[in-house]
Image: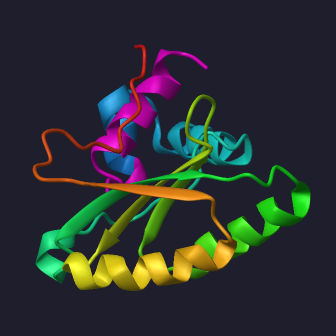
Amino acid sequence: MDRTDLGILAAMQEDATLSVGDLAEIVSISKSACWRRIQKLEEQGVIRGRVTLLNPGALDLSLTVFIAIKTNQHNENWAQQFNAVTESIPGVMEVYRMGGDVDYLVKAVVKGMPGYDALYQELIKADLYDVSASFVMEELKQTTALPLRS
């Protein structure tokens, strides 16, 4: 991956609606060369997709919660059940298997405390050992842009 690829990626992270022509101009290459590079980055899995980022508050999804989960069942069947449960809950945005004191960390966005309670009722169907939630009071920084060297 060279400086041109990194420039394309940086510009796309900033604004995924840029046309190939605009991207080509930003990195100083032809449209066809830019298009080929984008296709190659997609084929390599560097570009996973292109999305529109929404404002949760504008959609009445005012509560972001981080849920720390511990399990006493470290087996494939439980892991598959947990994955199925978290995949089925619309408010669950991210799920991570962790090292350390917590087994899983879940990020969810819901409509206030009643929304969290409904999510919790669905989540415990995965037969959890211990659940602890932390609620976001203020978002200080949030980005989807990965740090690229250029």
52 or 102, which lies in front? 102
41 relative to 55, above or below:
above
Give the x, y percent position of residue 135: 24, 56
Taking depth in this image into account, of 82 and 149 the one nearest to the observer is 82
User: Which residue is found at the position 40% from the left and 38% from the top?
Assistant: 24
Direction from residue 9 to residue 124 in the image, left or right: right
Q: Residue at x 30, y 63 (%)?
A: 53
Q: Nearer the viewer, residue 116 or 94?
A: 116
Q: Is 70 positioned to the left or the right of 16 in the image?
A: right
SS assignment for the magenta stretch, majority: helix
> What residue range appears in magenta?
1-20
- Residue lying furthest right in this view? 76
Compared across the picture, whether 31 is left or right of 95 comes to left
Residue drawn 56% across the image and 16% down it: 2
Q: Position of residue 3 (x, y in %)?
A: 47, 16
**Could you tell me which quadrant the C terminus lies in?**
top left
The quarter of the picture where residue 81 lies is bottom right
Query: Residue 55, can we see it?
Result: no
38 lies above or below 8: below
Q: Quadrant of the N terminus?
A: top right
Q: How many marks?
A: 0
53 and 24: which is toward the camera: 53
**Residue 136 location, x and y as percent?**
20, 53
Q: Position of residue 4 (x, y in %)?
A: 47, 23
Q: How is the image coloured?
A: rainbow
